[in-house]
Image (tube, rainbow, N blue to C red):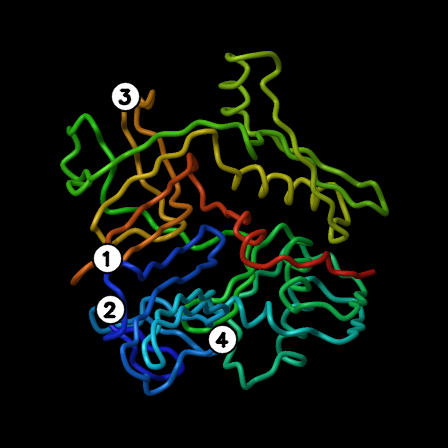
């Protein structure tokens, strides 16, 4: 494993077991590490510098150093704690000016802003931007963080934006997902089960759970409703109507079909009530990955699909140890609670 900050190799200064990487279901990530210097280093890490972590010959994480905290032990010796954020930080640090756009879709607006207002020196390139329902609007944005402007435009279509490890920007309705090559099977009947399952915890919660979703336009009051029938039926067996509802507004809704499209997209990507967390040294898990879980002792008597929502890797001598969190879902889903911790930002002003 190699750790470079600002182009300087700091691997030799890394305290054992201190480096960790966290990857979230919304394609966001964070980094932490502790360095020890017993002599003055070639270059002391500084906030704003680029971080890259390489393992087995390839870059496995990249981002920006956002915080350091040092403790001095002598005039030349010090311990330095580091915190970094993935390349999405490039959008969170840049403030856009007043922008007035003619009639265009939210996706076209995102492409126009990225191509015309974002500094090319940051190395950000355009990837895939899904078109969405196709409703056009004239947008006026007041000065705001670029990240919050893209939050607004993505939400217009019920989408998510992210920046991948190659500094490529994407805005899509469905996050990348893959089928896992292994399953979690506590009955040990499946030959493809994860053999290196070190610990497993199981949680159920209705926090954030929804099986009914409304989408509407505030101006026209056009609305649509979608329901996850299987999860509603399951919750009805437990109490009452079993309905857990939520509503989302979007000015991109021009018809009932648009509203139904966004409502169905939101409710299908919402997680269920169940969550598992396990530890392993296996390195083939990624956010958005779908895996089958069978665990009768946890109440999962028949195989259920779970989606990997978070991965935390801690570097140990010669390898990473991973803590993987997966939520009940047959589709890729997003976790946005990280934003409250990593970057507090005000709502974007737009009309």
Report, in whole angstroms, how far the alpha carbon at label 2 lies from the one at label 4: 23 Å
Circle 1 residue: 320
Q: Do the residues labelled 1 and 3 touch (CB within 8 Å)?
A: no
Q: Are marks 1 and 2 in contact (CB under 8 Å)?
A: yes
Label 4 or label 3, whichever comes before in sequence order: 4
Label 1 or label 2, whichever comes before in sequence order: 2
Report, in whole angstroms, how far the alpha carbon at label 1 lies from the one at label 2: 9 Å
Label 2 or label 3, whichever comes before in sequence order: 2
Q: Are marks 4 and 3 in contact (CB under 8 Å)?
A: no
Label 2 or label 4, whichever comes before in sequence order: 4
Identify the residue at the far front of this view.
Answer: 74
Q: Do the residues labelled 2 and 3 touch (CB within 8 Å)?
A: no
* Residue at 36 percent of width and 67 percent of height: 61
Expressed as whole percent of the image width and height from the top left, the position of residue 238 reads 51, 13
Which mark, by number, is residue 296?
Answer: 3
Q: Which of marks 1 and 4 is in front?
A: 4
What is the secondary structure assignment of the residue under circle 2?
strand
Q: In which quarter of the image is residue 339?
A: bottom right
What is the secondary structure assignment of the residue under circle 4?
loop
Circle 4 residue: 47
* Residue at 30 percent of width and 77 percent of height: 10
Question: Going by the image, does 258 lie left or right of 28?
Answer: right
């Amino acid at each position: 494993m190699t750790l470079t900050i600002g182009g300087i190799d700091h691997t030799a200064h890394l305290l054992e077991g201190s480096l960790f990487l966290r990857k979230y279901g919304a394609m966001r990530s964070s980094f932490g590490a502790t360095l020890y210097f017993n002599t003055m280093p070639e270059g002391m890490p500084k906030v704003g510098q680029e971080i890259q972590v390489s393992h087995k010959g390839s870059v496995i994480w990249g981002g920006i150093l956002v915080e350091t905290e040092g403790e001095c032990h002598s005039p030349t010796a010090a311990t330095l704690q580091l915190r970094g954020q993935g390349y999405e930080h490039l959008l969170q640090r840049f403030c856009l000016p007043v922008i007035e756009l003619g009639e265009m879709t939210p996706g076209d607006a995102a492409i126009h802003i990225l191509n015309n207002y974002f500094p090319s020196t940051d190395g950000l390139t355009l990837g895939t931007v899904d078109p969405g329902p196709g409703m056009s609007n004239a947008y006026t944005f007041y000065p705001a963080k670029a990240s919050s402007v893209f939050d607004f435009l993505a939400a217009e279509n019920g989408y998510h934006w992210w920046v991948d490890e190659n500094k490529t920007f994407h805005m899509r309705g469905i996050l990348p997902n893959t089928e896992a090559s292994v399953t979690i099977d506590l009955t040990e009947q499946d030959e493809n089960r994860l053999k290196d399952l070190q610990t497993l915890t199981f949680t159920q919660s209705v926090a954030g759970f929804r099986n009914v979703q409304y989408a509407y336009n505030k101006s026209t009051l056009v609305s649509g409703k979608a329901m996850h029938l299987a999860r509603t039926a399951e919750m009805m067996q437990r109490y009452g109507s079993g309905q857990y509802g939520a509503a989302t507004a979007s000015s991109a809704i021009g018809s009932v079909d648009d509203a139904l499209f966004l409502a169905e997209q939101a409710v299908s990507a919402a997680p269920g009530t169940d969550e598992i967390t396990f530890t392993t040294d296996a390195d083939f898990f990624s956010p958005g990955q779908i895996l089958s879980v069978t665990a009768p002792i946890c109440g999962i008597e028949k195989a259920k699909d779970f989606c990997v929502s978070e991965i935390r890797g801690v570097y140990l001598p010669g390898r990473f140890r991973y803590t993987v969190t997966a939520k009940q879902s047959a589709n890729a889903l997003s976790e946005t609670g990280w934003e409250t911790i990593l970057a507090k930002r005000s709502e974007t002003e737009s009309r």
